[in-house]
Image (cartoon, rainbow, N blue to C red):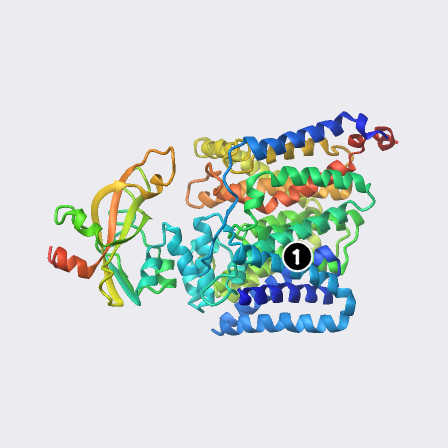
C-alpha cells in the first residue's frame, strides 16, 4: 500500500485545501458573530436591535401602561404591530379599527422630530417595499407612566434599513409615528376632532 | 453571571449524571445525551405543570431532579463518572465565559428575537395561550424553554454555545464509533481535512452563538442518525442505543417544527430492518409523536384547534396512528419504507417543479446562490462536500455507510419539501430567497454534521484513496 501514489489521495487533499483557501480568503463573507455584548435582558436586547416588530416592546420598556390606537390594518392603509408581542409585553390596549391619522398638512414635521425617541421599521403595504418607517415619539420631560399613543402618517422618508446597507439605493417609503397623545393634543389638537 | 454559571453547570452535570444512571457512560456521548435528557425533563415538566397552571414549579422541579441525579450518581459511580463531569463542566464554563465575559453573541436576526420573546414569556409565567399562532410554532419549544432558565429577565446566554459544544462532542463520538477498526492515520487525516473545510466558512462558526433551535435539532438528528447506522451495521440494537435514538428523535421533534419529519427520515433505515422488535419501533416513533403533540398542546396550537378535538384526544390519535407501522400487516411496506420514502419525496419535488416552474425558479436560483455562490455564507462548503462524497466509497457500501447515505439523501429531499410546504400552505410554494437568513439555508445547519460524518465514513472506507486497490478487490 502506497498512499502517496494514489491520485485520489492527492485530488482529495488539493481539493480540500483549495476549498479551504477559497472559503477563508477569496469568497466574500461577514463576521460569524459579534463581540462586546453586554445586554442579556430580553427587553433591552429587542430595543437595541431595532427589530421590525419591536415597537410594542420599546414602548412597554419605557412606560408602565401603554394604550395604542389608530394603527389600522397593515394590508390596508395602516401598519403592523404583532398581536403576540402586544400580549406578551402587556400593552394595555390596542385599537386597530381606525387608520392612522394623516397629519401631513396639519403640522410641520420638524416640530415633531424634536420629540422623536426611537426609529424602527414596520410591515405595511401599498408601495414597492413591504416595510415602512415607524418613529416612536413622546415627551421625555413628561414623567407620566401611563401613555396613549396615536398612529399618525407623516411625510415619506428614506427607509431606515436601506440606509444601513452600503451600495443599496435607499427607497422613499411611507412613514408612520406612534405619537404620544399629549403631544398630539398640545401641538395639533383633539385627535377625535377631525 | 454567577447565576448563569450555576444554572448551566447544573444542567450539564445533572444531565450527564442521569445519562450515566441510564447506561450512557461513553465520555463523548455523555455530554450530548445529558443535554437531551435535560431537554426531555424540562419539556415534560413544563408541559405538565402548565396543565395545572403551576409552571413555576416546572423550573424548580427541573433543577431538583438534575441535582438529585448528580448527587446520587456521584455517590454511586465514584471515580468512574468524573471524566464525563469534567468534560461537561469545561464546556459549560467556556460557554458562559464566551458570552458573559468575552461578550460574544449571535448575528442579529428576527427569528432570534422571536425566540427570546417566547423565552421571556416562559420566564415571566405569562399566558401560553398567546403562542397559539403559526409564528410561535415555527420557532420551536425546547430551545426557548432552555433559554428561559437564565437570570430573571435575562436569557441563558451560555446555552447556545454549550449546545454547539455538545454537537462537537457528538461528532467526535460518531467518528470514533463509525471508524472502529479503521486505520487511525486515515481517520485523523480525513478529520483534519474536513475540519478545515468546514470551519473556514461562516455558517458553521455562526451556529456557535446564533440564537435559534437549529443546533439543538442538529444534536438530536446526529445522535439518532449515527446510532441508527451503528445498529444497522451490527444487525442488533441495544437498550442504550434505543434510548439515544428516542432522545434524539424527541429533541429534534420539539426543537424545530420540521424536526419530526427529519427525525422520521433518519430512523427509517432502522425501522426498515426485518430484525427490529416491534416494541422498539413503538418506542422510537412515540418519542417523536409524543414530543410534538405535547408541544402543540402546550402552545394551544391552531393545528389542534382546527381539528375541534380536545388536546388529549388529539394526542391519543396522533400517538396511536404513529404505532401503526409496528403492526405485522404493515411489515411489507415497513421493510421497504426507506426507498419508498425517498422515491415519494423525489416525485413530489419533481411534480412541484413542473407544476410551479415560475414560483420555484427564483428559489432554485436562491439555492444555487446560497450554496455555491457564497450568498448563504456557506462558501464552497457544499462544493467540497460533493467532491468528498464522489471520492468516497461508491460501490458495495458497508451497511452503516449505506444507511448514512440514505439518511443524507432523505434529509436533502425532506428539507426541500418542508420549505415548499412552508409557503405552499398559503398557496405560494417556494424554495427560499438569497441570503444567509433564508430558512432553507439555515436548515442545513441541522444536517451539515450528518453530511460530514457520512463523507468521512465513505473516505475512510474507500481503500483506493489510500493506495490499497488490490487489497480492496481481494
Evaluate whether residue B167 shows in this view: yes
Residue under the point 45% across and 69% down: B125
x and y percentages locating residue B431 in the rendered image? 49, 38
Q: Is residue B407 above or below residue A136?
A: above
Drawn side of residue B457 relative to residue A144, left or right: right
Q: Chain of mark 1?
A: B
**Count of numbered tags:** 1
Which image quadrant for residue B388?
Answer: top right
x and y percentages locating residue B360 in the rendered image? 47, 34
The answer to which of B32 and B233 lies nearer the viewer is B32
Residue under the point 39% across and 54% down: A48
Which residue lies under the disc numbered 1?
A: B32
Q: Is residue A163 above or below residue B52?
A: above
The secondary structure type at the circle numbered 1 is helix
Q: Residues within 10 Å of mark 1 (few under 14, many from 20)?
A: many
Q: Is residue B474 above or below residue B301?
A: above
The answer to which of B332 and B288 lies nearer the viewer is B288
Evaluate whether residue B323 shows in this view: no
The quadrant the C terminus of chain B occupies is top right
Residue under the point 68% across and 47% down: B333
Residue under the point 64% across and 45% down: B449
Drawn side of residue A8 relative to residue A86, left or right: right
x and y percentages locating residue A6 in the rendered image? 79, 26
Drawn side of residue A107 relative to residue A126, left or right: left
Amino acid at each position: 500500500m502506497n498512499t502517496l501514489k494514489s491520485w485520489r489521495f492527492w485530488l482529495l487533499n488539493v481539493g480540500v485545501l483549495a476549498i479551504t483557501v477559497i472559503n477563508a480568503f477569496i469568497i466574500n463573507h461577514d463576521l460569524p458573530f459579534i463581540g462586546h455584548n453586554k445586554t442579556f435582558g430580553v427587553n433591552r436586547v429587542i430595543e437595541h436591535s431595532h427589530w421590525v416588530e419591536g415597537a410594542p416592546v420599546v414602548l412597554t420598556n419605557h412606560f408602565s401602561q401603554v394604550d395604542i390606537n389608530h394603527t389600522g390594518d397593515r394590508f390596508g392603509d395602516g401598519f403592523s404591530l404583532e398581536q403576540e408581542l402586544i400580549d406578551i409585553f402587556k400593552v394595555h390596549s390596542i385599537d386597530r379599527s381606525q387608520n392612522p391619522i394623516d397629519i401631513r398638512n396639519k403640522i410641520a414635521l420638524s416640530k415633531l422630530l424634536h420629540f422623536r425617541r426611537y426609529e424602527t421599521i414596520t410591515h405595511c403595504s401599498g408601495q414597492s417595499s413591504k416595510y415602512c418607517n415607524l418613529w416612536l415619539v413622546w415627551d421625555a420631560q413628561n414623567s407620566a407612566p401611563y401613555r396613549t399613543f396615536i398612529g399618525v402618517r407623516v411625510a415619506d422618508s428614506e427607509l431606515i434599513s436601506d440606509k444601513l446597507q452600503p451600495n443599496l439605493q435607499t427607497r422613499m417609503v411611507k412613514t408612520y409615528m406612534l405619537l404620544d397623545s399629549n403631544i398630539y393634543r398640545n401641538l395639533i389638537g383633539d385627535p377625535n376632532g377631525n | 453571571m454567577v447565576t448563569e454559571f450555576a444554572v448551566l453547570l447544573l444542567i450539564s452535570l445533572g444531565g450527564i449524571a442521569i445519562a450515566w444512571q441510564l447506561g450512557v457512560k461513553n465520555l463523548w456521548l455523555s455530554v450530548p445525551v445529558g443535554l437531551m435528557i435535560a431537554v426531555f425533563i424540562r419539556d415534560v415538566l413544563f408541559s405538565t405543570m402548565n396543565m395545572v397552571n403551576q409552571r413555576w414549579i416546572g423550573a424548580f422541579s427541573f433543577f431538583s431532579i438534575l441535582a438529585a441525579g448528580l448527587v446520587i450518581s456521584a455517590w454511586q459511580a465514584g471515580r468512574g463518572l468524573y471524566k464525563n463531569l469534567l468534560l461537561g463542566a469545561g464546556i459549560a464554563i467556556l460557554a458562559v465565559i464566551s458570552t458573559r465575559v468575552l461578550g460574544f453573541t449571535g448575528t442579529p436576526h428576527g427569528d432570534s428575537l422571536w425566540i427570546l420573546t417566547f423565552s421571556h414569556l416562559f420566564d415571566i409565567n405569562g399566558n401560553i395561550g398567546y403562542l397559539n399562532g403559526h409564528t410561535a410554532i415555527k420557532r420551536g419549544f425546547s430551545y426557548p424553554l432552555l433559554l428561559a432558565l437564565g437570570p430573571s429577565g435575562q436569557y441563558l446566554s451560555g446555552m447556545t454555545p454549550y449546545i454547539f459544544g455538545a454537537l462537537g462532542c457528538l461528532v467526535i463520538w460518531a467518528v470514533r464509533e463509525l471508524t472502529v477498526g479503521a486505520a487511525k492515520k486515515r481517520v485523523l487525516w480525513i478529520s483534519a481535512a474536513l475540519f478545515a473545510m468546514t470551519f473556514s466558512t461562516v455558517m458553521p462558526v455562526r451556529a456557535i452563538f446564533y440564537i435559534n433551535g437549529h443546533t439543538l435539532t442538529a444534536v438530536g438528528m446526529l445522535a439518532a442518525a449515527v446510532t441508527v447506522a451503528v445498529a444497522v451495521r451490527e444487525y442488533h440494537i441495544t437498550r442504550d442505543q434505543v434510548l439515544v435514538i428516542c432522545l434524539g428523535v424527541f429533541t429534534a421533534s420539539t426543537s424545530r417544527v420540521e424536526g419530526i419529519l427529519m427525525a422520521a427520515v433518519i430512523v427509517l433505515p432502522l425501522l426498515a430492518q426485518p430484525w427490529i422488535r416491534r416494541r422498539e419501533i413503538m418506542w422510537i416513533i412515540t418519542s417523536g409523536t409524543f414530543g410534538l403533540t405535547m408541544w402543540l398542546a402546550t402552545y394551544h396550537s391552531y393545528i389542534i384547534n382546527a381539528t375541534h378535538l380536545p388536546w388529549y384526544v388529539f394526542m391519543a390519535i396522533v400517538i396511536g396512528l404513529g404505532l401503526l407501522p409496528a403492526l405485522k400487516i404493515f411489515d411489507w411496506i415497513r421493510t421497504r419504507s426507506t426507498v419508498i420514502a425517498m422515491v415519494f419525496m423525489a416525485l413530489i419535488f419533481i411534480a412541484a417543479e413542473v407544476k410551479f416552474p415560475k414560483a420555484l425558479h427564483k428559489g432554485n436560483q436562491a439555492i444555487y446562490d446560497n450554496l455555491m455562490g457564497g450568498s448563504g455564507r456557506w462558501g464552497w462548503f457544499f462544493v467540497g462536500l460533493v467532491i468528498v462524497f464522489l471520492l468516497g466509497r461508491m460501490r458495495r457500501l458497508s451497511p452503516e455507510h449505506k444507511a448514512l447515505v440514505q439518511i443524507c439523501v432523505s434529509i436533502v429531499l425532506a428539507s426541500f419539501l418542508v420549505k415548499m410546504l412552508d409557503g405552499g400552505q398559503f398557496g405560494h410554494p417556494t424554495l427560499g430567497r438569497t441570503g444567509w437568513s433564508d430558512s432553507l439555508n439555515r436548515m442545513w445547519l441541522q444536517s451539515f454534521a450528518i453530511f460530514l460524518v457520512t463523507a468521512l465514513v465513505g473516505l475512510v472506507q474507500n481503500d483506493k484513496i489510500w493506495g490499497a486497490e488490490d487489497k480492496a478487490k481481494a
